[in-house]
Image: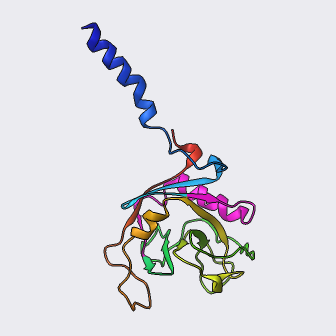
């Protein structure tokens, strides 16, 4: 009986260790890191409030609201990017309940792993949607807001289901999803 209680106590104290947030790469502030659990694995994004403070706050706010949970990667184009963040309509036509965020453009280059805010033709129309670059996309430099970079899990991003070759829209049928999105500092 004592052994059973000892094992039970050991398991009880070990449970919090199993529920710990992921170990962040060195130099990544948990207050400015987003952890995305997808249907293909985990992705960790280091936000860049030094480049785009308003956009960084928006992503954290929406993650804390649960807005991004179970949201698909609705537009995924091989060799270019994977777009997600439409928690309203799930197809790229929606936005959050919050007002659009004014552009915070920089000359920070769009390259593999860089995360940018999606927008309409109006430069000040970014709201909730974002994209992750598969490769160099320098043609976006200075025209879209760089919000962060993938610091862990780019191999997961590479596994996301992509649109058929030749697709102009990049729309994905039965897309992969962001199952749970959290600010790393909030994970317990």
Residue 55: horizontal and vertical position, in percent?
66, 65
Q: Is residue 145 above or below residue 168?
A: above
Number of numbered discs overlaid on the protein picture: 0
Place residue 74 in its image quadrant.
bottom left
Residue drawn at x 42%, y 72% is 90
Task: Judge whether residue 48 is colored magenta.
Answer: yes
Task: State the residue lying farthest toward the left.
Answer: 1
Residue 107: horizontal and vertical position, in percent?
75, 77
Q: How is the image coloured?
A: rainbow
Left or right of residue 20: residue 141: right
Task: Judge whether residue 10 is colored magenta.
Answer: no
Residue 127 can be seen in this image: no
Q: Is residue 186 above or below residue 12?
A: below
Residue 25: horizontal and vertical position, in percent?
59, 50
Q: Is residue 107 above or below residue 165?
A: above
Residue 6 can be seen in this image: yes
Residue 120: horizontal and vertical position, in percent?
59, 83
Left or right of residue 176: residue 31: right
For the N terminus, which image quadrant?
A: top left
Residue drawn at x 48%, y 38% is 20
What segment is highlighted magenta in the picture? 45-74
Left or right of residue 106: residue 98: left
Residue drawn at x 57%, y 72% is 112
């Amino acid at each position: 009986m004592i052994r059973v209680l000892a094992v039970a106590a050991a398991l009880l104290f070990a449970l919090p260790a199993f529920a710990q947030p992921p170990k962040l790469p060195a130099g990544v502030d948990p207050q400015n890191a987003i952890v995305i659990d997808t249907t293909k694995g985990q992705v960790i994004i280091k936000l860049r409030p030094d480049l785009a403070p308003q956009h960084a706050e928006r992503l954290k706010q929406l993650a804390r609201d649960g807005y991004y949970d179970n949201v698909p990667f609705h537009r995924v184009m091989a060799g270019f990017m994977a777009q997600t963040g439409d928690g309203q309509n799930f197809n790229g036509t929606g936005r959050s309940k919050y007002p659009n965020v004014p552009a915070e453009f920089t000359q920070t280059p769009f390259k593999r792993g860089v995360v940018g805010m999606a927008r309409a033709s109006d430069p000040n129309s970014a709201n909730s949607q974002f994209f992750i670059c598969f490769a160099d996309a320098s043609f976006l430099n200075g025209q879209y807001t760089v919000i962060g970079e993938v610091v862990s899990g780019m191999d997961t991003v590479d596994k996301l289901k992509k649109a058929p070759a030749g697709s102009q829209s990049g729309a994905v049928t039965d897309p992969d999803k962001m199952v749970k999105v959290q600010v790393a500092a909030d994970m317990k």
